[in-house]
Image: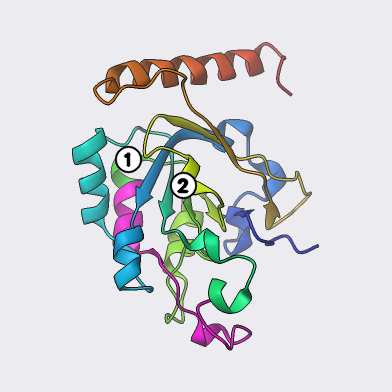
Amino acid sequence: MAEHTLTHVDAPAHMFRGRPYIHEIPLERMVGHGVIIDVTEKVAVNVGYGVMVEDLLNWEAHFGKIPEGAVVIMKSGWYKKYPDPALVFGSEHWNNTETHKFPSWTIDAVEWLLSKRHVIALGVDTPSVDLRGLRALPVHDRLFRDSIIALEGVANLGAIPPCGSMIFIPPLKLYKGSGSPARIFATVPKVMHNDGHNEVEIALKDANHRFRSARMNGKIP
C-alpha cells in the first residue's frame, strides 16, 4: 500500500529535509477547528480554479475570523468523482501528470492563511494541494517549510458545515513515513443556530480544552 493513497496526509518530510515524518507529528497538530471553503460554483465554471484570498475573506464575512489552529479544507465537490482516475485527475491520460487538471489552492491564499491565521493543516478534496500545470509545487513547499501537514483526497465534505466542526486527522503512525492514509472525521455541536456563532465558538473551545486535558492526564495516548 502506498503512503499517499486516496484520503491521506502529507507529512512535512515528504518534500522538505529536516521536517517531521508522519510518526513525529504530535496529536495536538492533528485536531483543529474545521473551516470548509466552498468553491463548488466557481469550479463548475473553471475546473482548474485556485482558491484565492478573496474566497477566504468572503468566508470570514459570513462566519467570522478563521480561528488560530484551524484545519482549512477546500470543498469543490471533486470527491464525488472517485474512484474513476480519468475524472479524478481531469484527464484521459491520467498517467501523465502534465495533463492533470483539477481545483486546488493558490500560493497567495496559502501564504495568507499561514502568516495571518496560523492554521495547522490545509486540505483539498482533489488529488493535490497544488494546482497542476506548474513544474514546481509551491504550496507543498510553503506548507512544509512551516511544518504544516497537507490533506489530500478528503471525502464527504458535503456532510460538514462551513464552520462549527472539530476535524480530527488520525493517520497510520508509520515510522519515517512521508505520508499516510487517514480516516479523517469531524464532530459538530448538537446545538447550532444561524445567529449562534458565539455559542459555537464556546462549544469548540470547550471541546478542544477537554481533549488537551485528557491527553495531559494520560487518558489519551
| Residue 179 belongs to the span the image colors magenta | no
Of callouts 2 and 1, the N-terminal one: 1
Q: How far from the left and from the top, in percent, is residue 210?
A: 55, 14
Looking at the rendering, the stretch of residues picked out in magenta corresponds to 89-114
Say which residue appears at 45% left-offset and 78% top-offset: 101
State the residue in front, 178 or 100.
Answer: 100
- The answer to whether residue 18 shows anywhere in this view is no
Dot 1 amino acid type: Arg
Residue 95 horizontal side relative to residue 133, left or right:
right
State the residue in front, 17 or 130.
Answer: 130
Say which residue appears at 43% left-offset and 34% top-offset: 69
Quadrant for the C terminus in the image: top right
Q: How far from the left and from the top, in percent, is residue 130?
A: 45, 67
Residue 64 horizontal side relative to residue 113, left or right:
left
SS of the residue under disc 2: helix
Which residue bears the numbered disc 2? 158
The furthest residue to the left:
61
In whole angstroms, how far apart are the C-alphas of marks 2 and 1? 24 Å
Residue 187 horizontal side relative to residue 214, left or right:
left
| Residue 108 belongs to the span the image colors magenta | yes
Quadrant for the N terminus in the image: bottom right
Query: Which label number is shown at residue 117?
Result: 1
Number of marks present in the image shown: 2
